[in-house]
Amino acid sequence: MSLRLRMRQALPEAMRARDKVAVSALRSALAALDNAEAVPVDGSGPRGLEQSPVGVGATEAVRRELSERGMADIVRAEAGERLEAAARLTAPAQADRATRLRAEAAVLMRFLDGPDPEAHGFS
C-alpha cells in the first residue's frame, strides 16, 4: 500500500479518535504531497478569450506523479521541519508548542521506515 494511501486512511481514524496532533500532521503532509504534484504555472501571462482552449478537458493539466521514494522524502522533510522548529523553541513559554511539533514529527515518522525520528537523521 502506498504511503499516501496509508496516510489518507489514517486521517479519518485520527479524526474519529479526536487526535488533534495526528490530524494536523497528516493534513499538512498530504497537502505537501498534493502541492509537490502540482503542475508549474507557465509564465506566458493572461490570454484573451479568443486564445482560450475549447472543449471538454481542454484546460485540464496532467499532474506530476511522485514515486514512493519522492513521497517518503517529502514526508521526511515535513517531519524534519517540525523537529528543527521545535529545537528553535527554547523559551519556557514555547515548551507546549515544541512538544506538539515533536509529536507531529513522530506521527509522520511512523509512516516511514521506523518510528524513531533520530534513526532518520533528525534530532
Image (cartoon, rainbow, N blue to C red):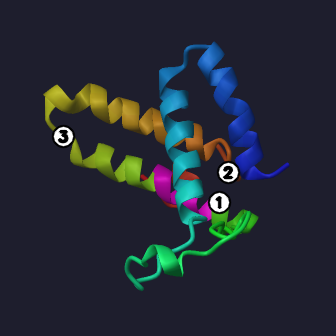
Q: Residue furthest front?
A: 50
Q: Main secondary structure of the magenta part?
A: helix
Give how far apart the Cα atoms at labels 3 and 2 are: 28 Å
User: What's the residue at 75%, 41% (across, down)?
Assistant: 6
- Location of residue 43 with respect to 92 vertically, above or below: below
Image coords of residue 101 (percent x, y) = 39, 37
User: What's the residue at 15%, 27% (across, down)?
Assistant: 93
Q: Mark 1 points at which residue?
A: 72
Q: What element carries label 2?
A: loop
Q: In this view, does 88 lie to the left or right of 19?
A: left
Q: Nearer the viewer, mark 2 or mark 1?
A: 1
Q: Give the range drawn in magenta.
A: 72-79
Image coords of residue 36 (percent x, y) = 55, 64
Q: What residue type is labelled 3?
A: Thr
Residue 3 belongs to magenta span: no
Q: Which of marks 1 and 3 is nearer the N terminus?
A: 1
Q: Mark 3 points at which residue?
A: 90
Viewer can see residue 73: yes
Q: Mark 2 points at which residue?
A: 112
